[in-house]
Amino acid sequence: MSDVLITNVGVLVTGDVENPRSNAESVYVADGVVREVDATTTTAETVVDARGATLAPGLIDSHVHPVFGDYTPRQRTLGWCESYLHGGITSMISNGEPHLPGRPPDVESAKALATLAHKSFERERPGGVKLRGGTLILGDGMTEDDIEDVHREGVERLKFLMPVEDRSLGRDLVRWGHDRDMVVLMHCGGTSLPGVESTDAELFVDIQPDIAAHTNGGPTPVPDEEVRKLVTETDLVLDLVLAGNQRVAVDILQLAADRDDLHRVQLGTDTPSGTGVTPLGVLLEAAILASMTDVPPAEILCLASGTTATHHGLDTGRIEPGRPADLVLLDAPKGGPRDDALATLAHGEYPAVDKVWVDGELLVERSRNTAPAKTPAEVL
Ligand SMILES: [Zn+2]
């Protein structure tokens, strides 16, 4: 049995936004699964002295656009997922694979693409990251049989990249997805690509998808009064992304916090996209939000892990017995003005990623993308 004991944890971020911090000082992992929090087990094959660092669930990027493998044709970048792993990302959610070169617009091709992306990412973790791929891009002419076909093949998400022309078909597509426990996303905001139409709050109220994808714009948000309606007049999941408008993201998070609606907020990047490949994107988004709102940084890390997992029915995102040991050890960056990871986020910088585990396997011993930790953990 391979096992790991992480000791001397300074702060443990749980992933549960209702109860974001724990005083537990150790976590015991065996066979890829968290077995004990505040462990009674005192020895293991590998013991890691965290030296006071912050242990958090591996972060989940709620909004990525993969195609296949660890390559994005949009920015012609190989190894982008592995680079995100070095930004603390252990899981990613595809919001569709529209960057496939020559993507055909017909219904059968859309179904085939979603199915193949889903199955290929089930078989292969790009760069070690758990990528939930395969999101069906909805379109006019689709029927309930089409939704059933992709559902039967394992596809878990549907996405309106643009509104369908027939509103009643839009409502039917949502219902057909919900009948099969699928998550329905809808592009929120201005046009992102040629051929993609803008959406407004009224459309969300009418069609009732689950998630307003890039609620703060991707890259262009809806007008401020429409944003307010999305927060106050719907129960949509609010998806805050790096590739959108950060002033609007700050407004949305603060409004959600004031309304006791933090459980609706998730964090992502909406990349690869025109904004680029952003390996530290979720940490940077967290730093912006932690420094510009009064939401505590531990809660923001929970939004970027356990809350996103809940929205998508993932078993990861929390540090609890029985959950996969997808973990990230964070610290203040060497030479930084603060002494721990949470204070660093609250100050507006991203912290150092010191270690990353996926299913209990140490995949990053020291991030190649962040500054080194002020007090690096020691593998004993
Ligand atoms: Zn997107």
Image: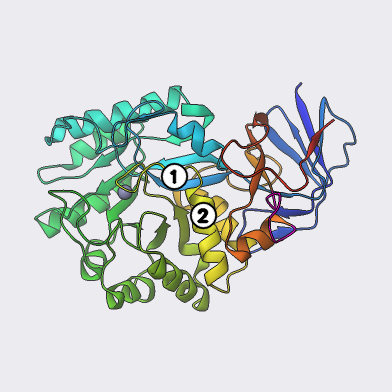
Residue 151's spot in the image, x, y percent? 31, 35
> 290 left or right of 176?
right
> 65 left or right of 131?
left
Relative to the observer, which residue lies in front, 185 or 197? 197
Q: Is mark 2 within 8 Å of ligand 1?
A: no
User: Please, what secondary structure does the residue beneath circle 2 have?
Assistant: helix
Residue 289's spot in the image, x, y percent? 52, 65
Specify the label residue 284 is tagged with: 2
Q: Quadrant of the C terminus?
A: top right
CA separation, marks 2 and 1? 9 Å
> Is residue 154 visible in this depiction of the protein?
yes
- Residues in magenta, as a range: 331-339
Q: Is mark 1 within 8 Å of ligand 1?
A: no
Residue 128's spot in the image, x, y percent? 53, 28
On screen, residue 271 above or below 246: above
Residue at image position (79%, 53%) is: 10
Q: Which residue is mark 1?
A: 278
Q: Are dots 2 and 1 in contact, CB under 8 Å?
A: yes
Residue at image position (68%, 39%) is: 322
> 178 left or right of 354?
left
Amino acid under disc 2: Leu
For the rendered model, the colour scheme is rainbow
On screen, residue 292 above or below 353: below
Upstream in sequence: badge 2 or badge 1: 1
Crowd rating for badge 2 (residues with CA inside 10 Å; few <14, some 14–19, many 20+) = many
Dominant SS type (magenta)? loop
User: Please, what secondary structure does the residue beneath circle 1 have?
Assistant: loop
Crowd rating for badge 1 (residues with CA inside 10 Å; few <14, some 14–19, many 20+) = many
